[in-house]
Image (cartoon, helix red, strand yellow):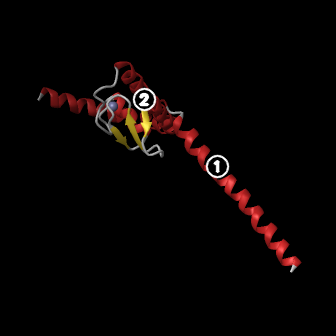
Amino acid sequence: MYGRGTGTGSNSSDPNATAATSSTARSRSKNAAGNRSDIGWKHGNDVQGNAKKVKCNYCSKIVSGGISRFKHHLAGTREDCEPCASVPDEVKVVMMKVIAEIKETSKKKRRLVSIKKEEEDIQSEGANCKKEESINRTIATA
Ligand SMILES: [Zn+2]
């Protein structure tokens, strides 16, 4: 009697308590800190609380597809969604810069990888370039 009662009681309560607190704390901090620091959240509101639908502060339109697509909405790039009709020019310019910077950083990363390849290509392409030039001239004159 004694052994059963105390044994099951202490074993079941302890692991449950620790598991519940640690798992909720982890998932919360990941979602909140990762996405809400983005500059896009200054101009829109999270509709569903999962950062997938953003309501525009200026035209009240809901942009689905996350904060990066919402920035395209503000910048008016027309790449991923309709441009915003009511966004102030200041904000528009800032968003265009942000998007351009994101593109630049992704380009630089690619460049670092392909620099060696490009150097090899330039050396071997020297002969080909002259050929192409003469072909273009003949086309232009004809
Ligand atoms: Zn808008």
Classed neighbour count for the residue bearing mark 1: other residues with Cα under 10 Å, few (<14), some (14–19), many (≥20):
few
Task: Tell me if I can see residue 124 in this picture.
Answer: no
Q: Is residue 23 left or right of residue 116?
A: right
| Residue 53 position within the rendered picture, expressed as x and y whole percent measured from the top left | 40, 43
Between 71 and 23, the one nearer to me in the picture: 23
Which quarter of the figure is the C terminus placed in? top left
Task: Tell me if I can see residue 40 in this picture.
Answer: yes
Question: Which residue corresponds to the image point at 22% horizontal and 33% vertical from the top-left?
Answer: 135
Q: Residue furthest right?
A: 2
SS category of the residue bearing label 1: helix
| Residue 33 position within the rendered picture, expressed as x and y whole percent measured from the top left | 58, 39
Q: Amino acid at mark 1?
A: Arg
Q: Residue furthest left?
A: 142
SS category of the residue bearing label 2: loop
| Residue 9 position within the rendered picture, expressed as x and y whole percent measured from the top left | 79, 69
Classed neighbour count for the residue bearing mark 2: other residues with Cα under 10 Å, few (<14), some (14–19), many (≥20):
some
The quarter of the picture where residue 32 lies is top right
Between 57 and 133, the one nearer to me in the picture: 57
| Residue 104 position within the rendered picture, expressed as x and y whole percent measured from the top left | 45, 30
Between 94 and 47, the one nearer to me in the picture: 47
Q: Which quadrant of the picture is home to ligand 1? A: top left
Question: Which residue corresponds to the image point at 61% horizontal and 43% vertical from the top-left?
Answer: 29
Query: How far is disc 1 from disc 2 in space, using C-alphas?
Result: 27 Å
Which numbered circle lies on residue 26? 1
Q: Is residue 60 left or right of residue 108?
A: left
Which numbered circle lies on residue 43? 2
Question: Which residue corresponds to the image point at 31% horizontal and 38% vertical from the top-left?
Answer: 81
Count of numbered circles on the image: 2
Which quarter of the figure is the N terminus placed in? bottom right
